[in-house]
Amino acid sequence: MVLTSDGTWQQLLRNKYLGAKPLVQVKQDFLHFGTFKIKNGSHLEGQGLKDQYSGLYSITRKKFITIAEALTDTETIFSWRRTLFGSRLVAWNELCSRIANIQLTQEDDTFHWNLIQSGQFFVKSHYQALIKNEVPNLNKRL
């Protein structure tokens, strides 16, 4: 288990899997092979709100907030780069009504690794999946 953010193994993993990619792109490659499981079983149609409301997401100033943060104060937590009107205003009103009905719990969500029946992540399974999917190795130094 990697317990610190520096050291030989951490640098090796960074060089091997990040290469020249930004961390967000690597995250998307990784998440392709897994699924988030919400403990209480409820979700909003199986897709992230940023994907369901991409028009709003593209013009918000603060991109990464939790539903809990949004529920505390929807008026001041959101700041827009453009004025909301038309379809964006309709989408905003719909989003506000949807999140107002969410009942938050203290249960933790989990990540299920789809390549292994147990759902646990193993580097070997990820590596084999990358090879099988012919993902190019952009960092051939290792």
Image: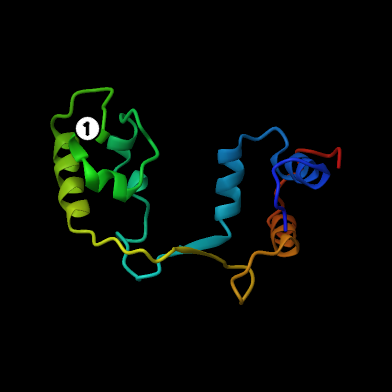
Residue 81, position as x, y percentages in the image: 28, 23
Left or right of 96 in this view: 134: right
- Is residue 112 visible to the viewer in this orientation of the structure? yes
In this rendered view, identify the residue nearer to me: 75 or 21.
75
Q: Is residue 97 above or below residue 123?
A: above
Q: Quadrant of the C terminus?
A: top right
How far across and how far down the image is residue 114, in percent? 58, 68
Circle 1 sits on which residue?
Answer: 76
Q: Residue 111: where, in percent of width, then height?
A: 52, 63
All told, the count of numbered labels is: 1
Task: Establish if 125 lies above or below 82.
Answer: below
Q: Is residue 52 visible?
A: no
**Disc 1 secondary structure class:** helix
Q: Residues within 10 Å of mark 1 (few under 14, many from 20)?
A: few
Q: Residue at x 68, y 56 (%)?
A: 133
Give the farthest residue toward the top. Answer: 82
Instruction: Report the front residue among 57 and 110.
Output: 110
The residue sitting at the bottom extreme is 117
Left or right of 124 in this view: 50? left
Residue 110 at x, y percent in the picture: 49, 64
Give the residue at x 77% y 39%.
15
Amino acid beneath label 1: Thr
At 70% across and 32% down in the image, what residue appears? 20
- The colour style of the image is rainbow
State which quadrant residue 45 falls in: bottom left
Spot the residue most to the right: 141
Dividing the image into 4 quarters, which one contains the N terminus? bottom right
